[in-house]
Image: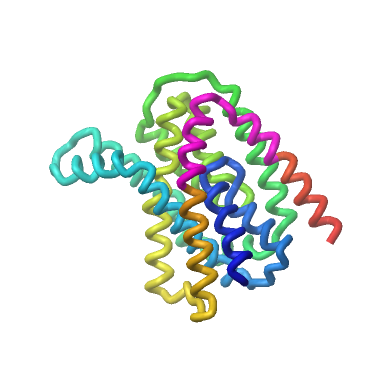
Amino acid sequence: MDIIEAIVLGIIQGLTEFLPVSSSGHLELAKAILGDNSVPEESLTFTVVLHAATALSTLVVFRKEVAEILKGLFQFKWNEQTEFSLKIIVSMIPAVIIGLLFEEELESFFGGKILFVGLMLLVTAVLLLLADRAKKTDKKVSITNAIIIGISQAIAMLPGISRSGATISTSVLLGIDRTKAAKFSFLMVVPLIFGKVAKDLLSGDINFTSAEALPMSAGFIAAFLAGLVACNWMIALVKKSKLSYFSIYCAIVGVIAIVYSLMQ
């Protein structure tokens, strides 16, 4: 993988991580188009690196909220920040269980499964369309809601299912305020990503040569910068109920991916 390719993939990851169009699905499609012949393990390593970049951009965008949460937690008493943290932890449980028990099975879906990605993008399109038609409310995320949203996040570990699309759509369909839904969706994945990166680093699953260091770094920086832009943009779009546009986009890309796969 050269630097230009890494930057292109980084920008795609940064934009699609927050926009409800499936970052993992787009990365798989981009790799197929660019002729990336990485085996699934190598492909997953680069994907994890880019996800770490977008997780960092999330912390930058929500730095005030994160600071308030940490401040509240260090008061060591039950408060709004502690309650929010508990909901984040609860929402992580389904993805942690699936990730630990079915890690090899999940990895097998990466590395050129274009037909599968196309089908899952169509699923994402349906979810977004349903969410866009939901009524607006000012409801907050409850513990029960957090569990259901967490299940959506676990399902979205499949390439082609948008994580932000699935979690935000699920939240909106549960009647949660759109702004609160977007905030919860973006923050709930941060501990999971950093946890995954730490686990892979300690286990030795993430390995790349010195020759790959520069492309990896370039991809990381590109994903981080694109993520800053996309995160702020997505929050504004969710408030304005513009999810149907992304539904149409996912449907079009999904059909193209399916046709492309069948023609190979």
Q: Position of residue 164 (x, y in %)?
A: 52, 42
Asked whether residue 240 is drawn in magenta, I would say yes
Residue lying at 72% horizontally and 49% vertically, measured from the top left: 118
As drawn, the residue found furthest toward the right would be: 263
Taking depth in this image into account, of 20 and 62 the one nearest to the observer is 62
Q: Position of residue 9 (x, y in %)?
A: 60, 59
Q: Is residue 64 left or right of residue 55?
A: left
* Picture quadrant where residue 134 is located: top right
Task: Name above or below for residue 91 compared with residue 11.
Answer: above
Percent from the top left, x then y, of residue 119? 71, 47
Image quadrant assignment for residue 250: top right
Q: Is residue 160 visible?
A: yes
User: Is 140 contained in the magenta span?
Assistant: no
The majority secondary structure of the magenta stretch comes to helix
Q: Does residue 21 lie above or below 209 as drawn?
A: above
Front residue of 1/134: it is 1
140 relative to 68 in the view: left or right: right
Q: How many marks?
A: 0
What span is colored magenta in the figure?
A: 228-250
